[in-house]
Image (cartoon, rainbow, N blue to C red):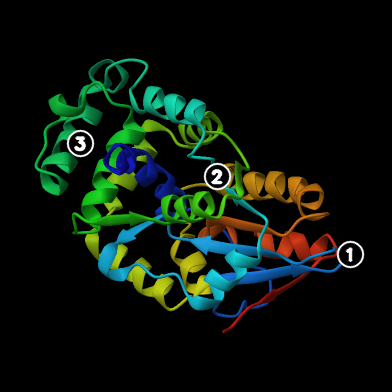
Amino acid sequence: MKTKFQFIFAVFAFFLICKVSAQTKTSKLENSLLWEISGKELKKPSYLYGTIHMICSKDYFLSEKAKNAFEKSDKLLLEINFTDPNEMSQMQQLAMGKEPLSKKLTSEQLAKLDSILKKSTGMSVQQVDSFSLLTVLSLISIKSFGCLDLKFYEMELSDAAQKRNISIAGLESVKTQFEILENAYSNDEKLTLLEESTPEETVELVDAYKSENIEAMYAFSTDKRFTSEKTKKQILDDRNLNWVEQMPELIKQNSIFFAVGAAHLGGEYGVINLLRKGGYTVKPIMN
């Protein structure tokens, strides 16, 4: 079953690895992937955890502080609930393109995609003609990690939640995420991102993640050279605002363990800063 998810999880990793234009206007955040949410007369604290979505098994870790917070939580909230059969069915459908890439792309774009694929995966554009361009992105993202034994944080956390018999839910749907990506980037921009997805960048990102350096991760994922403020707003800011709007009702009575891509934590419109603006105390758990 895990093999079936690889393409789609890699697409979600795009939200973290992609380059989006931004300016950080907030105070520097401490090096921690785990943050406690309290205040506003909450009965129990909730927790915000930043993931890298996928990582090689040799690099995978879940710190004791994260395990302890997870054990205290009453519910797991992910970006998407991958244990929902309906979401899984939608996921598989969306992996395929609405029309072949040979019809969707210009001859120049197809030639560029063919060159990128051959260089990064050894495949040709003909072999991926029925896939969406986002699924092709996932293929290249997987290859950039340079290992065959990938682990997925959302999958590991979902397994742990099921063992504890606590409920799992999503902040948005598979369809929503795909629509955001499809609308946020032109085909040329997607091809540029495909071209820029390199093993060296992935190593840099993984190193920052293992150091729990969310400032470095946010800086890595914000580069004005590659995309517009409009795109950044669509794939980060607007989604963060939507999630934070949902959170007050979710955390009112229960302790929730929120696990989202670490790129969503930092920045002026990051989840941490938005919760603080909403009156909550959000502090890093250092050990």
Which of labels 1 and 2 is toward the front?
1
Any mark on residue 235, and which?
2
Earlier-in-chain disc, 3 versus 2: 3
The image shows residue 178 at horizontal and vertical percentages of 48, 32
Is residue 226 something one can see in this rendering? no
Residue, disc 3: 112
Q: Position of residue 236 (x, y in %)?
A: 58, 49
Residue 59: image quadrant is bottom left
Mark pair 1, 2: CA separation: 29 Å
Residue type at numbered disc 2: Ile
Would you call the spot at circle 3 few (<14 residues within 10 Å), some (14-19), or many (20 or more)? some
Q: Are there few (<14), some (14-19), or many (20+) residues within 10 Å of tag 2?
A: many
Label 3–label 1 contact, CB within 8 A: no
Circle 3 SS class: helix
Q: Amino acid at mark 3?
A: Lys
Cα separation between marks 3 and 1? 53 Å
Across and down, in percent, residue 75 comes to 65, 52
Of labels 3 and 1, the one closer to you: 1
Could you say where residue 213 lies in the image, as x and y percent from the top left? Answer: 49, 76
Q: Residue at x 50, y 25 (%)?
A: 86
In the depicted view, which residue is nearer to us: 93 or 194? 93
Nearer the observer, 159 or 257: 159
In the image, residue 225 above or below residue 201: above
Placement of the N terminus among the 4 image quadrants: top left
Question: Measuring 79% from the left and 68% from the top, which residue is drawn there?
Answer: 38
Q: Which residue is mark 1?
A: 40
